[in-house]
Image: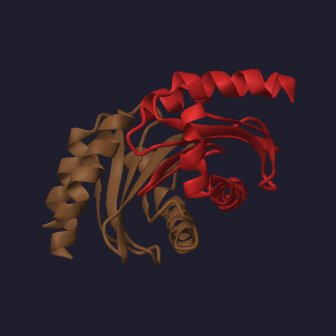
Chain colours: A brown, B red
Amino acid sequence: MFSDHLKKIVSSVDGAIACSVMGFDGIAVETHQAEAGAAAAADLDLATAWVEFANVLSQLKQVAGTLKTGAVAELSVNTEKCITLMRMVNADYFLVLGMSPQANYGKGRYVLRVTAPLIAKEL
Amino acid sequence: MFSDHLKKIVSSVDGAIACSVMGFDGIAVETHQAEAGAAAAADLDLATAWVEFANVLSQLKQVAGTLKTGAVAELSVNTEKCITLMRMVNADYFLVLGMSPQANYGKGRYVLRVTAPLIAKEL
């Protein structure tokens, strides 16, 4: 189940706020929020931010086809109040993880990288 | 001098290919390439990729003003063949570092973070 994977991601990364499987249309298929992350997710209005970031990722995916650097695998947008990591799952979906600025960034990258193929199998 | 800062960044990050101070118009003010990075920079056509990524960062900067997550501080675009880290210097300029996929990502982030304020003073 998606939700088990998302729970696992959120619980294994210190500072994680919420994690979603999202489509490039900006619609979340499934979301898991850290228990301690509900207030932060609401304050930061993560849902709105992620729609915008999904749009950016979608554009990057298209432009990458014209570049020699290869397909986009991962995008990270770090703002004053939040770290947002996105990892491609397949041509239509990606994983997005919102973390506090003090979160374990390396762990977040690692967990998304190993989880993306597991989610791809279930889509 | 900018070039000294850029040299220092490139030499202190294993796997660094090239580093620039760029404007949001996609024009590089100054660039330093690793000696061993010239072939990679040409193969990957980093100059073209960075113009596109600068465009994405510029859009993100604008959209961030409408979001509650705060101003964009850092953007990372990781493709199959290249890791690209961008760090805001001020409202008009940013630092961009291209690295091989096996590069020391954490070191790259750290070095850009500490160098950006030094470059801001000289702009």
Q: A55 or A69, which is in the foreground? A: A69
Tell me the residue at 51%/56% (across/down).
A45
- Placement of the C terminus of chain A among the 4 image quadrants: bottom left
Tell me the residue at 36%/66% (across/down).
A94
Q: B79 or A21, which is in the foreground? A: B79
Report x, y in % for residue A57.
51, 65
Residue B3 visible in the displayed image: yes
Residue lying at the far right in this picture: please name it: B123
Q: Is residue A19 above or below residue B100?
A: below
- Placement of the N terminus of chain A among the 4 image quadrants: bottom left
Residue A80 visible in the displayed image: no
The image quarter containing residue B38 is: top right
Report x, y in % for residue B33.
65, 36
Tell me the residue at 22%/52% (across/down).
A114
Q: B74 or B6, which is in the foreground? A: B6
Q: How many marks overall?
A: 0
Report x, y in % for residue A7.
20, 52
Image position of B101 (left or right of A2): right
Q: Is residue A101 above or below residue B11?
A: below
Q: A29 or A37, which is in the foreground? A: A29
Report x, y in % for residue B118.
74, 21
The image quarter containing residue B106 is: top left
Tell me the residue at 70%/53% (across/down).
B61
